[in-house]
Image (spheres, rainbow, N blue to C red):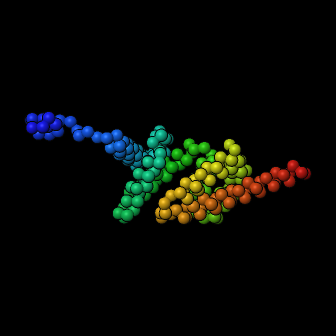
Amino acid sequence: MSSRYSRQNCVPSSPPPQDAKTDAQFSRLDGARISQQRSTALLARLLESSDPTGVARQSLEGLNEDFFMTGSAYLTLARKDGNADVADRLERALTAAWKVKQSSLRPELQLLNDLIRAETEAERKQLYISGGSDLLSTLSMNDRWFASALGRMAADVERQPPNQGKAQLLGRLRAIQKETEALEKQQKHQTARQQQQ
């Protein structure tokens, strides 16, 4: 009998040797599995709670991309299965989590997220109007961080392989770029006129 096997049960006494690449793949898979389990557990706590916003505030670190992707997957499944009650509960929990996460972000990212979520030009125009001078300040703060983040995001989307929704998102990002650049230009002209008077 080979030394790899114990005599009692004829099972390997140690795992077969693995190379570093295989170890790294297993580590990534294990990390993804753990992350999904954490996200699912947090989502369950939000669903069970009478105060999902409070739970979300206490779990801010867990409100990450993996959490929202996992939640979105469960929401899609509930809708596909025609389970309206579960879909509604998931949507409420995810909305509460999103609001908490959104409020923790820097103002430029909050604005960017709001503009991206606005599906039409009219909805974005309403955001521009309601934002007023605060919105204009947000566009220019931190060396125009908003514009550079928006540019990076558009470039990232452009590099993605073709997929459903890519063209729509890219079109929306480009529209936001044009609209916000026009707002900044308009603000500069108004400021220059005021200084001349």
Residue 46 locus on image (x, y percent): 42, 46
**Residue 21 visible to the viewer:** yes
The answer to which of 44 and 34 lies nearer the viewer is: 34
Q: Is 25 placed left or right of 180 in the picture?
A: left
Residue 152 locus on image (x, y percent): 59, 51
| Residue at figure coordinates x 69%, y 44% from the top left | 143
Q: Count the marks: how many?
A: 0
| Residue at figure coordinates x 45%, y 42% from the top left | 62
**Residue 55 visible to the viewer:** no
Q: Residue furthest right?
A: 197
Residue 116 locus on image (x, y percent): 58, 57
Which quarter of the figure is the N terminus placed in? top left
Find residue 114 and report its image quarter. bottom right
The answer to which of 33 and 154 lies nearer the viewer is: 154
Q: Is 197 placed left or right of 111 in the picture?
A: right
Does 140 sit above or below residue 158?
above
Q: Is 184 placed left or right of 114 in the picture?
A: right
| Residue at figure coordinates x 35%, y 43% from the top left | 21
| Residue at figure coordinates x 49%, y 63% from the top left | 162
Residue 16 locus on image (x, y percent): 23, 40
